Amino acid sequence: YWKVTTAQDGLLTVSITTNVMPGCYFYLYDTNGEKLLRNVWVYDAESLTKEYSISVRPGTYCIWVDRYYEIDFDYTLAASLTPAPFAKAALPVPRSHISRT
Protein backbone atom coordinates (compact mmCIF):
# COMPACT_ATOMS: atom_id res chain seq x y z
CA TYR A 1 0.00 0.00 0.00
CA TRP A 2 0.91 3.67 -0.24
CA LYS A 3 0.79 6.37 2.42
CA VAL A 4 -0.04 10.06 2.04
CA THR A 5 0.52 12.51 4.89
CA THR A 6 -1.45 15.71 5.43
CA ALA A 7 -0.34 18.47 7.78
CA GLN A 8 -3.69 20.28 8.10
CA ASP A 9 -7.46 19.92 7.70
CA GLY A 10 -8.66 19.98 4.13
CA LEU A 11 -9.92 18.15 1.09
CA LEU A 12 -7.61 15.30 0.05
CA THR A 13 -7.87 14.51 -3.66
CA VAL A 14 -6.33 11.27 -4.87
CA SER A 15 -6.25 10.24 -8.52
CA ILE A 16 -5.31 6.96 -10.13
CA THR A 17 -4.45 6.48 -13.79
CA THR A 18 -4.32 2.96 -15.18
CA ASN A 19 -4.92 0.92 -18.32
CA VAL A 20 -5.78 -2.34 -16.57
CA MET A 21 -8.53 -4.46 -18.07
CA PRO A 22 -11.04 -5.39 -16.78
CA GLY A 23 -10.29 -3.18 -13.78
CA CYS A 24 -8.88 -2.68 -10.31
CA TYR A 25 -10.01 -1.66 -6.84
CA PHE A 26 -8.87 1.51 -5.11
CA TYR A 27 -9.14 1.77 -1.31
CA LEU A 28 -8.47 4.70 1.04
CA TYR A 29 -8.07 3.94 4.76
CA ASP A 30 -7.87 6.15 7.84
CA THR A 31 -4.70 7.03 9.72
CA ASN A 32 -4.68 3.68 11.52
CA GLY A 33 -5.20 1.71 8.31
CA GLU A 34 -8.31 0.20 9.89
CA LYS A 35 -11.38 2.15 8.73
CA LEU A 36 -12.25 2.13 5.05
CA LEU A 37 -12.98 5.70 3.94
CA ARG A 38 -13.39 5.13 0.21
CA ASN A 39 -13.79 2.07 -2.01
CA VAL A 40 -13.75 2.60 -5.78
CA TRP A 41 -13.94 0.23 -8.73
CA VAL A 42 -11.84 1.50 -11.66
CA TYR A 43 -12.76 -0.35 -14.85
CA ASP A 44 -13.13 -0.80 -18.61
CA ALA A 45 -10.80 1.65 -20.25
CA GLU A 46 -7.65 1.61 -22.29
CA SER A 47 -6.41 4.54 -20.26
CA LEU A 48 -8.47 5.80 -17.36
CA THR A 49 -8.04 8.42 -14.68
CA LYS A 50 -10.37 8.47 -11.70
CA GLU A 51 -10.23 11.21 -9.09
CA TYR A 52 -11.81 11.14 -5.65
CA SER A 53 -11.89 13.68 -2.83
CA ILE A 54 -12.59 13.33 0.87
CA SER A 55 -12.38 15.70 3.86
CA VAL A 56 -9.46 14.80 6.13
CA ARG A 57 -7.76 15.85 9.35
CA PRO A 58 -3.97 16.03 9.72
CA GLY A 59 -2.47 12.57 9.61
CA THR A 60 -1.30 9.72 7.43
CA TYR A 61 -3.75 7.90 5.18
CA CYS A 62 -3.25 4.54 3.44
CA ILE A 63 -4.03 3.90 -0.22
CA TRP A 64 -4.31 0.35 -1.52
CA VAL A 65 -4.69 -0.56 -5.19
CA ASP A 66 -5.72 -4.16 -5.83
CA ARG A 67 -6.10 -6.04 -9.09
CA TYR A 68 -9.31 -7.73 -10.11
CA TYR A 69 -7.62 -10.78 -11.61
CA GLU A 70 -4.18 -12.22 -10.88
CA ILE A 71 -2.52 -9.92 -13.43
CA ASP A 72 0.17 -7.33 -13.05
CA PHE A 73 -0.59 -3.80 -14.22
CA ASP A 74 0.82 -0.30 -14.13
CA TYR A 75 -0.82 2.65 -12.45
CA THR A 76 0.06 6.16 -11.34
CA LEU A 77 -1.16 7.76 -8.12
CA ALA A 78 -1.23 11.48 -7.37
CA ALA A 79 -2.46 13.35 -4.30
CA SER A 80 -3.13 16.96 -3.40
CA LEU A 81 -4.62 18.77 -0.41
CA THR A 82 -6.92 21.78 -0.63
CA PRO A 83 -6.94 23.46 2.79
CA ALA A 84 -10.09 23.93 4.80
CA PRO A 85 -11.40 27.54 4.76
CA PHE A 86 -9.33 29.90 6.88
CA ALA A 87 -6.46 27.41 7.09
CA LYS A 88 -2.91 28.38 6.21
CA ALA A 89 -2.06 28.70 2.54
CA ALA A 90 -1.88 25.24 1.01
CA LEU A 91 0.57 23.63 -1.27
CA PRO A 92 0.01 20.37 -3.14
CA VAL A 93 1.23 17.31 -1.26
CA PRO A 94 4.79 16.87 -2.56
CA ARG A 95 5.43 13.53 -4.22
CA SER A 96 8.03 12.87 -1.53
CA HIS A 97 5.12 12.66 0.95
CA ILE A 98 3.58 9.75 -0.99
CA SER A 99 5.49 6.66 0.03
CA ARG A 100 5.10 2.98 -0.60
CA THR A 101 5.08 0.63 2.36
Image: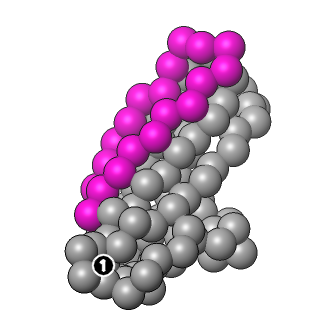
Q: Is residue 20 rendered magenta in the image?
A: no
Q: Is residue 69 found left or right of 90 in the rendered image?
A: right
Residue 19 position in % (x across, y down):
69, 23
- Tally of numbered discs: 1
Residue displayed at 68% across by 14% down: 46
Label 1 neighbour load within 10 Å: few <14, some 14-19, many 20+: some
Height in image: 18 above or below 92? above
User: Looking at the image, which is closer to me, 60 or 88?
Assistant: 88
Q: Is residue 8 found left or right of 47 in the rendered image?
A: left
**Residue 70 in which image quadrant:** top right
Height in image: 67 above or below 69? below
Residue displayed at 35% across by 51% down: 53
**Residue 97 in which image quadrant:** bottom right
User: Looking at the image, which is closer to me, 85 or 70?
Assistant: 85
Residue 96 position in % (x across, y down):
71, 75
Can residue 36 be seen in this snapshot? Answer: no
Residue 9 position in % (x across, y down):
30, 78
Residue displayed at 33% across by 63% down: 11
Q: Which residues are magenta?
A: 33-55
- In the picture of the structure, the residue carrying the numbered disc 1 is 9
The quadrant of the image that shows the N terminus is bottom right
Residue 94 position in % (x across, y down):
65, 72
Label 1, secondary structure: give it: loop
Residue type (three-letter) at the residue carrying disc 1: Asp
Q: How is the image coloured?
A: one colour
